[in-house]
Image (cartoon, helix red, strand yellow):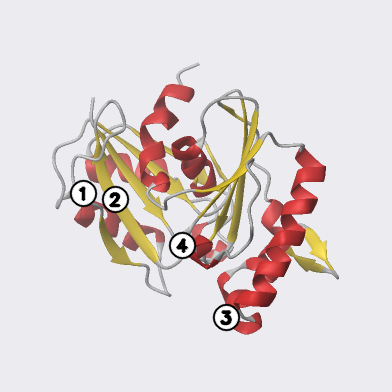
Amino acid sequence: MRTLSVDIGGSHVKASVLSARGKMLHDRVRAETPSDLTPNRLVKIIADLAAMLPPYDRVSAGFPGVVRGGVILTAANLGDERFAGFNLGRGLEKALDAPVRVCNDADMQGYGAIHGKGVEMVITLGTGFGTSIFENGRLGPHIELAHHPFHRDQTYEDELGDVALKRAGRRTWNRRLSRAIDVLRALTWFDHLYIGGGNSRHVRLDLPSDISLVDNAAGIIGGVRLWADMKT
């Protein structure tokens, strides 16, 4: 059973095909995310990437927003007005002629990063700020923590998104990240925290043993585990 796994981000859409064990069978292919992206154009971009890859039997897609039953509810960094209410799962099934499952992109990265023991939290540092939380390998309810007040009336995304990194500089951004980790630890009492996303390469903190940086490929690799977890 081969899985076409798609990581939809604010800057790029990336995809690869995975074996049943989650091994990439082809190097990731990618396309830039247009600033004026529409649902139909997104489906076409994914279909074009899929045509560059080996055959697959099913599809997993991680989307940067709240997704339920394949339907997008929010898309803060891509445009709520364009994406809210769009059934991405159904659109991809028609375009790709394969069964599709869609989840939040941080949840997908979590599937690719966790070890399945205790409470594990994942944060993604990219265009925005994503979070997911798991208990003994099972995904918890998705909470849009990125848009919750964090510090001085600013949200996590306001303080730690890509725009904030460019405006504040890496040193200040890292101080904010350290403060955010302290808050998340007190909030969730995680056993392990994984930090991923494109901007994780800018992390310069002295991380304790219960916090790890993860390769950005986790956003693709999680595609197999998405299907396994959602069977039950």
Q: Residue at 86% of width from left, 70% of height from top?
A: 152
Q: Which mark is residue 50?
A: 1
Verify CB contact (< 8 Å) between mark 1 and mark 3. no
| Residue 149 visible in the picture | yes
Q: CA distance from mark 2 to mark 1?
A: 7 Å
Q: CA distance from mark 2 to mark 3?
A: 27 Å
Q: Residue at 66% of width from left, 65% of height from top?
A: 157
Q: Amino acid at mark 3?
A: Lys
Residue that carries the numbered disc 2 in the rendered image: 15
Residue 62, given in percent of the width and then of the height, sits at 44, 46
Q: Is residue 85 above or below residue 79?
A: above
Q: Amino acid at mark 1?
A: Ala
Q: CA distance from mark 1 to mark 3?
A: 33 Å
Q: Is residue 68 left or right of residue 2?
A: right
Q: Residue at 65% of width from left, 34% of height from top?
A: 141
Residue that carries the numbered disc 4 in the rendered image: 198
**Residue closest to the far right:** 152
Residue that carries the numbered disc 3 in the rendered image: 166
Residue 134 found in image quarter: top right
For disc 3, the neighbor class at 10 Å (few under 14, some 14 to 19, many from 20) is: few
Query: Judging from the image, what secondary structure is the residue with disc 2 in?
Result: strand
